[in-house]
Image: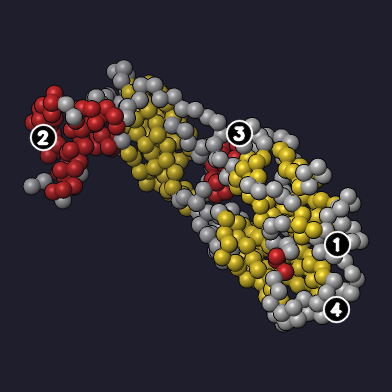
């Protein structure tokens, strides 16, 4: 307790000597010690489905909000001596863009005595399990022109992946209806909120064979949401070749000039010809996938700028299918496009203070003298305030 008392007193003195002064800004329910520390925890916890005002305070001697630090999920306003913090319009994307369970907003106020003062308000967010997990495709089909050996991994020819928007659901679970032919299990490969599955043969599957199974993707939340999709597996004697991409998963970056730069070329290993058909799933309004014959690779072009919500999402998943009709089976790959999470906004730092001023102040002899003087003049006030807050002062 002595250490805590000393640290609080030290912070008060440092704040005073670093160029900060007492202002006449007042918010009902915010004690002076919170103004000194610059931090307020709002006691109300909001659901991630909530929209609207979070809390309202009565104010005095505050003429307006000088600056709102960049925060995509909260906003604030002062009207007729009432200060209110709201969820912003982008709060509906909170679950997709973060895995945190709290958000903060820093506000700098104009005070009536021509000074400014700042507070950071912290809000806890409770996850409501209100999203079904989603799959990268609505249906899956695997076709082979030869027997499938035991232990063969079918997802090497067409990945299965899923995700869940609810931010506390860190896992999703893949299952297949009970059978003696194939198993479906989670893989260790996880990219952000994207989880991958492995579909393997439990025995040798001989031609002719055609069966449809049901895949289940659950979040194990409360309530437990389950998404289903059919998986059709065919083994025939028709001599079709296999169309393979050079990788099951490709990665790329969405650049600030709205272009897409891939980490490696997106190519078809074998099975491609001038009659090959390319099909794209997801984000077809924003990206176009085409085959560049001169480079012998697939090119992803951005056809319109991404929305702010999509950029803040940080990763976008595109599924690409390719086949040469009558010659090859369908080949599938996944493209993960990373965004930088920045929306091109800049924050003014005029009239702001940082730790540089504190370091300079502490390092000078004059400030040391001010520290001693402040300690003397405010000691009586401090002891009374700490006792009122429940601290034991010895």
| Residue placed most toward the observer, 88 or 186 | 186
Residue 348, x across and y down, in percent: 44, 24
SS assignment at label 1: loop
State how far apart marks 4 and 1 are (Cα).
Answer: 17 Å
State how far apart marks 2 and 1 are (Cα).
Answer: 84 Å
Q: Which mark is residue 207?
A: 4
Is 216 positioned to the left or the right of 222 in the image?
right
State how far apart marks 2 and 4 are (Cα).
Answer: 89 Å
The label nearer to you, 4 versus 1, is: 1
Q: Residue at x 49, y 28 (%)?
A: 346
Dot 4: within a 10 Å radius of its alpha carbon, few (fewer than 14), some, or many (20 or more) residues?
Answer: some
Q: Is residue 144 visible?
A: yes
- Residue under label 2, please give it: 379
- Residue under label 1, please give it: 328
CB within 8 Å, label 2 to label 4: no
Residue 250, x across and y down, in percent: 66, 52
Dot 2: within a 10 Å radius of its alpha carbon, few (fewer than 14), some, or many (20 or more) residues?
Answer: few
Q: Residue at x 35, y 25 (%)?
A: 352
In which quarter of the view is residue 40 placed? top left
Residue 299, x across and y down, in percent: 74, 43
CB within 8 Å, label 1 to label 3: no
Q: Which mark is residue 256?
A: 3
The label nearer to you, 1 versus 3, is: 1
The label nearer to you, 2 versus 3, is: 3
Q: Which mark is residue 106?
A: none
In which quarter of the view is residue 17 placed? top left
State how far apart marks 2 and 3 are (Cα).
Answer: 54 Å
């Amino acid at each position: 307790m002595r250490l805590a008392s000393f640290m609080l007193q030290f912070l008060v003195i440092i704040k005073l000597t670093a160029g900060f002064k007492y202002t006449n800004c007042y918010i009902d329910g915010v004690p002076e010690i919170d103004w000194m520390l610059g931090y307020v925890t709002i006691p109300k916890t909001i659901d991630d489905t909530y929209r609207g005002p979070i809390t309202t305070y009565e104010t005095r001697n505050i003429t307006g909000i000088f600056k709102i630090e960049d925060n995509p999920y909260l906003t604030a306003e002062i009207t007729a001596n009432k200060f209110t913090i709201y969820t912003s319009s982008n709060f509906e994307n909170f679950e997709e863009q973060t895995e945190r369970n709290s958000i903060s907003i820093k506000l700098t106020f104009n005070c009536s005595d021509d000074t400014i003062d700042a507070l950071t308000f912290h809000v806890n967010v409770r996850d409501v399990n209100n999203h079904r997990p989603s799959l990268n495709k609505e249906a899956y089909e695997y076709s082979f022109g030869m027997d499938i050996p035991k232990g063969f991994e079918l997802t090497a020819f067409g990945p299965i992946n899923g995700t869940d928007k609810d931010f506390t659901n860190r896992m999703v679970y893949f299952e297949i209806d009970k059978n003696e032919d194939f198993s479906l299990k989670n893989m260790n490969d996880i990219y952000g909120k994207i989880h991958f599955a492995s579909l393997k043969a439990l025995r040798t599957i001989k031609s002719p064979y055609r069966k449809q199974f049901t895949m289940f993707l659950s979040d194990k939340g409360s309530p437990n949401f389950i998404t289903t999709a059919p998986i059709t597996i065919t083994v025939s004697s028709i001599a079709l070749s296999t169309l393979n991409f050079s990788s099951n998963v490709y990665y790329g970056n969405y650049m600030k000039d709205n272009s897409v730069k891939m980490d490696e070329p997106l190519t078809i290993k074998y099975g491609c010809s001038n009659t090959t058909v390319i099909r794209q799933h997801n984000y077809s309004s924003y990206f176009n996938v085409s085959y560049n014959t001169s480079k012998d690779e697939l090119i992803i072009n951005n056809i319109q700028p991404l929305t702010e919500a999509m950029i803040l999402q940080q990763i976008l998943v595109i599924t690409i299918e390719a086949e040469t009709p009558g010659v090859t089976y369908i080949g599938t790959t996944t493209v993960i496009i990373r965004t930088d999470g920045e929306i091109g906004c800049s924050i003014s730092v005029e009239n702001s203070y940082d730790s540089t001023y504190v370091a300079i102040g502490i390092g000078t002899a004059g400030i040391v003298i001010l520290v001693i003087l402040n300690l003397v003049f405010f000691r009586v006030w401090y002891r009374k305030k700490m006792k009122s807050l429940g601290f034991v002062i010895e």
